[in-house]
């Protein structure tokens, strides 16, 4: 799933100097979410997430990767967060 989403989204958001760091499906209280985590060499603020979301949302709608209804959750990776930190 992550690689499919990267292939679809990365070219569209490179103009914002962002890329997909991770993508996964989660389910909580019966609600399915498609979580897309963005990263960049720059700080990603709320305005940048909003701009990227406007581009990503129609791409995900057209790709129709998940059966049924779901919530699209787009966020940024926290700076200083280490991979596989436990």
Image (spheres, rainbow, N blue to C red):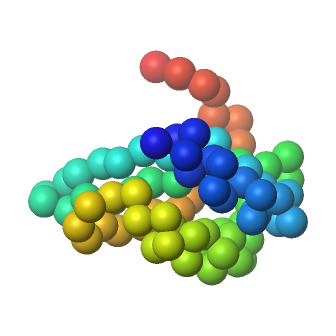
Q: Is residue 73 left or right of residue 56?
A: left
Q: What percent of the width, then of the height, locates residue 12? A: 75, 65
- Numbered label tally: 0
Rendering quarter of residue 70: bottom left
Front one among 77 and 5: 5
Q: Is residue 48 above or below residue 10?
A: below
Please state if 13 lies on the left or on the right of 23 as rendered: right
Residue at the farthest left position: 30
Q: Position of residue 18 (x, y in %)?
A: 77, 55
Residue shown at 55% from the left, 46% from the top: 4
Residue 72 is drawn in which quadrant?
bottom left
- Identified at 71% across, 43% down, the residue is 79
Q: Eyeballing the image, is 44 above or below 50?
A: above
The x and y percentages for residue 54 are 63, 80
* Residue 66 horizontal/vertical position (percent): 33, 58
Instruction: Decide if residue 43 is on the left or right side of residue 60.
Output: right
- The answer to whether residue 56 is visible is yes
- Residue at image coords 63%, 47%: 6
Residue drawn at (76%, 63%), measured in percent from left and top?
Answer: 13
Instruction: Say whether residue 46 is visible.
Output: no
Q: Nearer the viewer, residue 45 or 35?
A: 35
Name which quarter of the figure residue 57 lies in: bottom right
Q: Residue furthest front?
A: 63
């Amino acid at each position: 799933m992550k690689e499919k989403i990267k292939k679809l989204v990365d070219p569209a958001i490179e103009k914002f100097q962002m890329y997909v760091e991770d993508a996964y499906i989660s389910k909580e209280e019966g609600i399915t979410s498609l979580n897309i985590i963005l990263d960049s060499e720059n700080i990603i603020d709320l305005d940048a997430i909003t701009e990227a979301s406007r581009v990503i949302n129609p791409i995900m709608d057209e790709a129709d990767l998940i059966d049924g209804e779901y919530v699209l959750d787009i966020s940024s990776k926290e700076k200083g967060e280490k991979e596989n930190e436990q």
